[in-house]
Amino acid sequence: MTTRKEPRGVAEGTEGSGEGYHRGLGSRQVQMIAIGGAIGVGLFMGAGANIVEAGPSLVLMYALAGAVIFLIMRALGELLLYRPVSGSFAEYAREFLGPFFGYATGWTYWLLWVVTGMAELTAAAIYITYWFPDIPQWVSALVFLIALFGVNLVSVKLFGEIEFWFSMIKVTAIIGMIVIGVGVLTLGVSQAGDDAAVSNLWAHDGFFPTGIGSSLMTLQGVMFAYVAVELVGITAGESENPRETLPKAINTLPWRIALFYVGSLTVILTVVKWTEFDAGTSPFVAAFTKIGLPFGAAIVNFVVLTAALSSCNSGMYSTGRMLRDLASNREAPGLFRRLNARQAPATAVTVSVALMGIGVVLNYLVPEKAFGYVTSVATACGLWTWTMILLSHVRYRAAVVARRLPASPFPAPGGAASSWVALACLAFVFVLMALDSDTRVSLYVGAGWAVFLLVGWFNAARALAPAPVTTAPAGAPATEPGYVTGVTPD
């Protein structure tokens, strides 16, 4: 039988939460964190390889994946309004699926952001070579790692403010790129000339130029592009008014996907033929190089750089909160519970950032392969996290129907049925990853991670187990250590 845990830290408009955090994230910051979570290096960098593999049909793949993501986020939204807590989906997995699943989800989401942080640092270092080709990738990655680490130690308010402006740059730039692209199509004023046309979506070997199978195989890369949209759930414990700001942030997701992903890619693929892109270059930078606007490519490169730094910044924020939540449940060392004077989980963030430093090492050893290695592992971690959200939602809805728990004020459309549909889609993506030799490595890493989790869980379970109580044998002294006589002296 499902039992409800008392809400922790849900008081609205207070300075601190029951978890010790400072509620320093206002409505505009939560909104921009949600928007920024939908625009990252998976779009700006990863779309290049996907265009090569799928051609114009990649637009459809982003739309299909976006629909699944919206179902996941509405399921998470219903849970968040039932009980807004900083541990978010790890807490819900713990409540509705059992302690082990909460433990595994928390650690896996922590790993997701450590690995994603490596990917973002790698992408940022690649973008820097646009201006400074002689600077080694690992040097740029190290500088960015140290700078963002300092931001996350200062305060959640500073994190929120920097993330707000990072996201503002991305949003403004994408809207600007769409407007310029539409201008090129309608007015024809650019070096792209007559090559820019809506017919580019089907004129070069059709809408599925490499076959439907190849298009479907890109879904695994597309799903990586959406990793981070669930980050808004982590902000629940530090939002000033979660019951108002979280639904607004989640309900704006469809138009964000339609504009930033489907819209921007559609414009780019009409302005420039899909055959002119390559896997190692941001398609946004390539498109503006083709258009020939003065400083256009450099400006876009700056935008994609801020996108990478934004996502890495969010990753440091997320790993620190998730690691502290694990420590609060005695599933990680207790030292990770510590908050600094500014109410930030400094120890947890420090350890997480230190492990992100592996990304710097990869950029030193294999700079040309570092990005591909880490994105496939991050996708596998994202699939696990989203699966736990959906399964928790199914169990929660069952408890509501049975009247064991109160209904959420923000119910997901379609109820548990929509979560089952999303689960089937995630299972399909998992199969695609197993079929692709390039992404299959993530499943091998996942198997090793599962062994690590099981070993850690048995150790944690031993630590949590109460000490055995043994009845003293007849004639034994009542004060003998380790025994309870159960007899009260006269």
Image: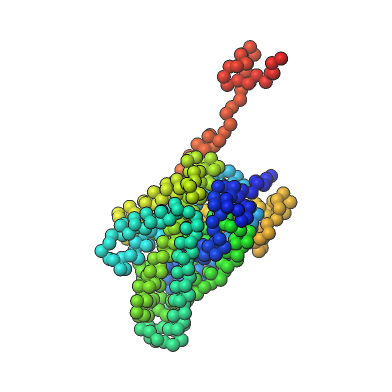
Q: How many marks?
A: 0
317 or 338, nearer to the observer: 338
Task: Write the residue at 59% across / 61% down.
Answer: 246
Task: Write the residue at 48% across / 75% down.
Answer: 175
Q: Position of residue 11 (x, y in %)?
A: 63, 52
Residue 386 versus residue 103 in the image, above or below: below
Residue 421 versus residue 92 in the image, above or below: below
- Residue furthest to the top: 475
Residue 30 versus residue 18 in the image, above or below: below
Task: Write the residue at 61% across / 25% down.
Answer: 469
Q: Position of residue 297 (x, y in %)?
A: 36, 74
Q: Quadrant of the C terminus?
A: top right
Q: Position of residue 32 (x, y in %)?
A: 52, 65
258 or 10, nearer to the observer: 10
Q: Quadrant of the N terminus?
A: top right
5 or 220, nearer to the observer: 5
Q: Position of residue 326 (x, y in %)?
A: 52, 45
